[in-house]
Image (tube, grey):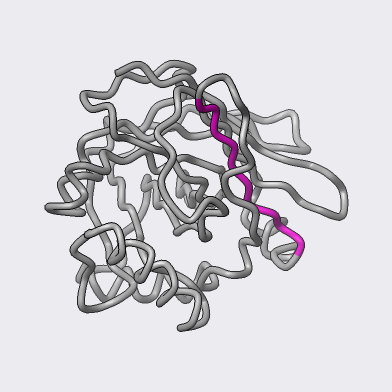
């Protein structure tokens, strides 16, 4: 996929060798426990240790505007996405689209069941870190023709990027994360429950300047 660097006339071809979905990455324990409780109430078997990391085939990353899923019970969620390429790091926004019926049995397997839409525009990590406190993370869903604000939080609610990378390296057993794509976690749902829509939009917005990266896509089941 071709990625474009925001604020610069620069693009590069990115072919990830590794895709990892990080889960339960709330910075404070109350936020993380809230997300765990959301899933427990829905009957999802949650991990004993958090944050949790789920490896997925990197071919599941997509910039497609239409995705196909094999269940009527799937939904997306907005996440900042770390991309490492050519010795540099970037932040995109993506949707950890997940088969929720399968998630009731096995979270790891549910992550592998759906492709992961990611924005074609990216921020340089250095820029993002300078403005981390003002980064808004939002998603919208369309259900029965109605567009709903689905998530609305701040990236700063999640573990700092380098702290999460340290935990990831401990879990992975080595420090080589070159040509990787890492979903960094999400914020709570405003609806309190999953919405199985036919369209989603995810956004990462730098509040001070209004600069943003986004991805929207339609779901066919």
**Residue 24's quadrant in the figure?**
bottom left
Classify the position of the N terminus by image quarter. Answer: top left
**Residue 195's quadrant in the figure?**
top left
The magenta stretch is: 134-143
The structure residue drawn at horizontal position 66% and vertical position 38%, both measured from the top left corner, is 213
Q: Is residue 118 left or right of residue 75?
A: right
Q: Is residue 134 above or below residue 75?
A: below
**Is residue 173 in view?**
yes
The structure residue drawn at horizontal position 50% and vertical position 75%, both measured from the top left corner, is 31
Question: Residue 197 appears at what percent x and percent y?
Answer: 45, 29
Q: How many marks?
A: 0
Question: Residue 106 appears at what percent x and percent y?
Answer: 14, 53
Q: Nearer the viewer, residue 220 or 91?
A: 220
Question: Residue 144 appears at what percent x and percent y?
Answer: 51, 22
**Residue 117's quadrant in the figure?**
top left
Question: Residue 137 appears at what percent x and percent y?
Answer: 63, 52
Most extreme residue toward the left, as rendered? 105
The structure residue drawn at horizontal position 52% and vertical position 30%, both measured from the top left corner, is 200
Q: Nearer the viewer, residue 125 or 150?
A: 150
> Is the magenta region chiefly helix, strand or loop?
strand
**Does the stretch in magenta take in 118?**
no
**Does the stretch in magenta take in 139?**
yes
**Is residue 88 in view?**
no
């Amino acid at each position: 996929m071709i990625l474009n660097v925001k604020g610069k006339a620069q693009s590069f071809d990115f072919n990830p060798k590794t895709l990892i979905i990080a889960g339960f990455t709330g910075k404070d324990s109350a936020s993380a426990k809230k997300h765990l409780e959301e899933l427990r109430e829905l009957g999802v078997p949650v991990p004993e240790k958090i944050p949790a990391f789920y490896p997925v085939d990197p071919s599941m990353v997509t910039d497609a505007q239409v995705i196909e899923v094999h269940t009527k019970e799937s939904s997306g969620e907005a996440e900042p996405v770390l991309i490492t390429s050519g010795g540099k790091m970037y932040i995109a926004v993506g949707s950890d689209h997940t088969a929720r019926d399968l998630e009731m049995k096995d979270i790891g397997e549910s992550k592998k069941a759906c492709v992961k839409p990611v924005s074609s525009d990216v921020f340089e990590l250095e820029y993002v870190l300078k403005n981390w406190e003002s980064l808004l993370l939002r998603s919208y869903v369309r259900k029965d023709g109605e567009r709903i604000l689905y998530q609305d939080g701040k990236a700063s609610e999640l573990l700092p990027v380098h702290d999460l990378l340290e935990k990831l390296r401990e879990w992975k057993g080595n420090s080589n994360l070159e040509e990787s794509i890492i979903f960094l976690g999400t914020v709570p749902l405003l609806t309190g429950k999953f919405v199985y829509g036919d369209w989603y939009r995810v956004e990462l917005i730098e509040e001070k300047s209004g600069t943003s990266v986004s991805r929207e896509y339609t779901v066919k089941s």
